[in-house]
Amino acid sequence: MSQQSRSNITTGVLKALGVFGGVQMVTIICSILRTKLIAVWIGAAGVGLFGIFNSAIELFGVLFHLGVRDSAVRDIASSQQPETNKIIIIVRRWVLILGVIGLVVTMVISPLLSNFTFGNYDYTYAFIAIAFIIFLSSIQNGELAILQGTKELSRLAKASIWGAIGGVIISIPLFYYWRINSVIPALVAYSIITTIAILSQRVSILKPAPRISFDETKSKGRSFISLGIFLTISVMVNHLVSFLFITYLNHVGDTSVVGHYQAGITLVNKYMGIIFTAIIMEYYPRLSQVSRSQNRTSIFVSHEISIMLWILLPVIAIFIASSELIISLLYSSEFLIITPFVVWAVVGTIFRAISWCMAYVILTRGEGKVYLITESLSAITCITLNIIAYNNCGLEGLGIAYMLWYVIYTIIVGMVYRFRYNLRLNNEITRLTTIATIAIVISVVGFIYVGWYIPAIVGLVFTPIAFRRVTRRRLAKQC
């Protein structure tokens, strides 16, 4: 790969990180604001109802959307015009079909859902409204997949931001005036506003639009639907394992232990995950485009891992140094007990970056069975390590388990990457992984046994180095 090509890739990654990192922050702030307003104006009952209905929306969304949001990106990104137009039309048809199925099934079983959830039929109409939300979210997923697959990342960012902000604005008067009765109307209004924001940025089909028969819709949609089914099963397996462990934790500990664990996992996965979500938005469609080339795939994966590790190294060190402050700000001083858990778990973020970059190769190759196997092995590893670690070391042990989980997952995915696809990471990745791991372990040990200034020093030392490493190829283009 030429110097200019590497420069273009690095520029694209940094641009995506800047744009979607900002999007994630706006989305999180809007989410925090909505939760705060619900707690103040509606109270605990409102928070509980929102939790129940959002869980139902998430569950049925996973079941009825069949992973199209992720699987369709691959087909769109790897296609060429006029084939791209055909796939876009087919994706829109499929999400409409899946949305209608989700709508009808959820409406039919809404009385059963009300009785099962609340012990009466008083919330039947609420679940009918949720069926409408599931239909809209299917349409949203299709359009978001199209935007990502066609690399319309600025449109995707605008849709996400305006959807989040618009949803909060429309919710405020509903919360204030209707209080507990605003729960379902607010959820529906939020979904409608989000749909409008996404549709306002939808990709247009070049005229004249190609004619596509039902048989062609079925045959061409089979690839991303098949992959989506395996993605759906993978998500369900992970949800099941998470539920089983939380149930176990509630039995051997108590609800406060569960709360501390959830707070720690949210902190590491959600807030550190901002970097992952931002970069993957650009990386996945780009990797899909070159999936047929062994050499380009290998170069792209190694280049992406290198960029992510250089970005993460100082960020993780500074995160460890300020972990107590972050926990106090986002939660309260009561949650400072999770600090050892968080600082050990964040070490696993290094291996999370490496494994994610390699795992996306499986998706770009469309091998749903292989992906399901790796994710299932990962889930089994996770719950096994968690149980052993908690029984021996409590909450801190769960942080160590998180770190070891991603080390093992990296080995699992690495074996698939090497032996199934005959791909290799370059030597630079091995050296960089070693440097990053040593630096972060020093940060953790220094933080626990000496003080916050040890990881702060590590972060300050590596920040200018990382900046030069990440930007030097990009700057070479400008020279």
Image (cartoon, rainbow, N blue to C red):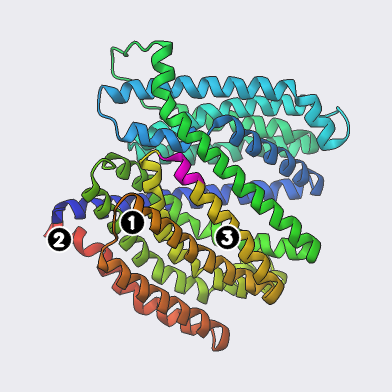
SS at badge 1: helix
- The residue identified by callout 3 is 381
Q: Around disc 2, counting alpha carbons within 10 Å, would you say few (fewer than 14), some (14 to 19), or many (20 or more)?
A: few
Q: Residue furthest front?
A: 419
Residue 204 versus residue 470 in the image, above or below: above
Q: Is residue 370 magenta?
A: yes
Tell me which residue sits at (69%, 51%) in the image. 243
Looking at this view, name the residue that lies furthest to the bottom.
Answer: 450
Q: Characterize the local packing of mark 3: few (<14), some (14-19) or many (20 or more) Cα atoms within 10 angstroms.
A: some
In the image, residue 44 above or below residue 139? below
Relative to 32, residue 187 above or below: above
Residue under label 1 = 418
Checking the image for residue 334, the label placed there is: none
Q: Which residue is at the front of the view, 417 or 113?
A: 417
* Location of residue 133 in the rendering, given as x and y in whole percent from the top left corner: 63, 28
Give the distance between the C-alpha atoms of the residues marked 3 and 1, in whole angstroms. 21 Å
The residue lying at 32 percent from left, 56 percent from top is 304
Per the image, the residue denoted by label 2 is: 476
Residue drawn at (55%, 68%) of the image? 345
Q: In this image, 452 relative to 84: left or right? A: right
> Secondary structure of the magenta portion, mostly?
helix
Residue located farthest toward the right when viewing the structure as drawn? 120
Between discs 3 and 1, the one toward the N terminus: 3
The quadrant holding residue 471 is bottom left
Q: Which residues are magenta?
A: 367-372
Image quadrant where residue 182 sits: top right
Residue 375 sits inside the magenta stretch: no
Q: Secondary structure at mark 2?
A: helix
Q: Earlier in the sequence, mark 1 or mark 2?
A: 1
Q: Report if residue 131 is visible in the image.
A: yes
When asked about the image quadrant of residue 85, the answer is: top left
